[in-house]
Image (cartoon, helix red, strand yellow):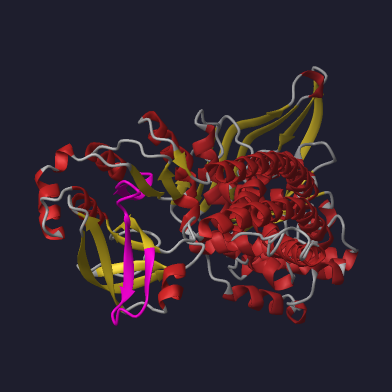
Amino acid sequence: MTSQLLTIRNSCIRVGDGEQGFRLDIPAFDLQAGDRIAIVGPSGSGKSLFVELLALIRPAPGSGYFTIRGRTGSTLVAHRDDVSAAEEERLVFRREEIGLLLQNGGLLRSLNVIENVRLPARISGTSLKIAGELLEALDVGDLKHRRIDSISGGQRQRVALARAMVTRPSLLLADEPTSALDPANARMTLQVLHEAVRVGMVQASVIVTHDEVLAREMGFDCIRITPAIENGAGVGQIAPRVLH
Amino acid sequence: MKRRSNLVLRLAIQDCRTEWPSALCMILAVTAVLVPVMLLLAIRSGVVGQMRSELTASPQAREMSTVGEPTVTPAMVAELRASPGVAFAAPRTRLLSAAGVMRTRDLQKGIDLDLVPSGQGDPVVRGRWQRDSVAVSENAARQLGIKAGAAVVLVIERRNGDGLAQQVRLPLKILDVVPAGQSRSNLAQAYLPYQVIEAVERWREDAKQGSLAQAHAANRADAKQRRYSGIRLYARSIDDVPKVRQLLQTRGLETASRAGDIRLVQRLERSMTIFVGSLAVLMAIGLVVALGAIQWGWVERKRFDYSYLRLLGMERRQLFALPVVQAVLLVIPAIVAAFIVTLGAQAVINRLFAGQVGSLRGVSNLSLTDSLLLTIIAFVVAMAGAFLAARNAARISPVVAIRGS
């Protein structure tokens, strides 16, 4: 049995005004448990904006809600007048349900490997035990006490992957996770993101990438963002994804 | 909640360790500002404090005696005793009447001495007064060869209308020997309850009084009509001396005291406090600006990390607390370093000026109060300096982490 994780209808995000502005239209976007989605499109098409929306950082008008583990956040995506209250609500939801993987890993230099992985668990107050197991599973268990500066780019990516999954989030969200990696590490990263869903570590993973070929090859369902110019301003439109 | 507070502390410590060159610069900057102020405070405490302690070491500085033989009423004595600045007050009889001869119990030795009004609470006399207690000055004790606890006889004489001498003998026990320097007078003196001296005066002047007991009873009978020839009193502290002196002046009583010396010390202390205080305020402002700038730069350098922490779900207040906790963590070693440097410099200064500045034991002497005050100020200033940086940190958007990637 599959369960719906996210439903967005008739939403759009605007940033800036006039010709400097940009609008991302999301007519319909559904996500359910077991999905591995790759959002693909050229630079400037609004991919990062979509990540910000899914990461509950940038609220957008329209209707949109997450339904995760029985919790429905109907106002999490949609704009609310009470911005500050909604912000804390989104923060808690993000902390507990969304794992994030950024292009450069986003690891803190001031913490060693294991402490970087434990960080989201410390922030959300969840168990720290899984951190070591994840590092072992990703073949970087022996780097636990190393400084971030002293490990390679590929190793950092594995550490960042472990960190993104340490709270066992429902949704794993990755923004350009392969763009700074060599082909072997890029492939490994997408494989981990794919496998994490298969083994039930996370319920779904959404990646934003330029590399549509690799994403398809690794079994991701690619959703395209099409850029356009409308009255001099940039517009991006995500292809509808509706699940029945 | 505790785990989240620990997280802020953990991140702050790790950040200071990683950024140790910046942390060290900040510690040195704070130390460099604290040391001169600490030294100035130490010198202020050293110079003024020692002058003050010399004044307070002996009750003499608090001693106040009326000049001449003014008229003092019992009401005035009662008013003075009730005054908060007065520790002890006893009325004086006429000086001519307040004299006697003290002999050792075996009557082998005897000396003339002045009778000084005293009693329970007299700051120069230690011990609990009994009915037969008397204290003597060191001079008197030396001449008589007696110590505290010795039995003596006080002999009072008068001449009756026929010119014949009459005596009363008062067997007494030495309660205490008042060391030289405790009182302004170095003469042979006997400290007796003022009621006894009053009775002596009455007995001497009124031939109808057959004994001291009768004279005492007569004094009690017309207590309200009594008039004294002065007052001996002690202020509660040296700071009370000028106030009490002024109070006495308003009652028409001129006094001999060390009010002039005390005023000089007070003025010096006030001037140095204003001087060091002004410097401390400037220091605090400078420190707030310096720490604020350093911490602001720190947060700006760490913008991505702060943004990522926010992205991971850290609350604004936790990010706000991070620079504040860091400031506190860095101020602690700065304060310790400042104390070490100051105490070292203090030792050098005191050695350099040893024996050159009057009787002062140490020119520089950092007091515990000043140390605590400076520590508190340093903490408050550090936190105030971190405030703007903390606000900046709390406002960093998680978008920075995504856009930066």
Name the residue: 49% across, 38% down: A85
Name the residue: 52% across, 61% down: B57
Q: Is residue B318 left or right of residue B86?
A: right
Q: Which residues are magenta?
A: B84-112
Residue B323, position in %: x, y? 67, 51
Name the residue: 62% across, 67% down: A166
Residue B359, position in %: x, y? 68, 61
Residue B7 sits in which quadrant?
bottom right
Asked if residue B84 can be seen in this view, the reply is yes
Residue A58, position in %: x, y? 64, 38
Q: How many marks?
A: 0
Residue B278 sits in which quadrant?
top right
Asked if residue B313 can be seen in this view, the reply is no
Name the residue: 10% across, 50% down: B208
Q: Is residue A228 left or right of residue B218?
A: right
Q: Is residue B151 magenta?
A: no
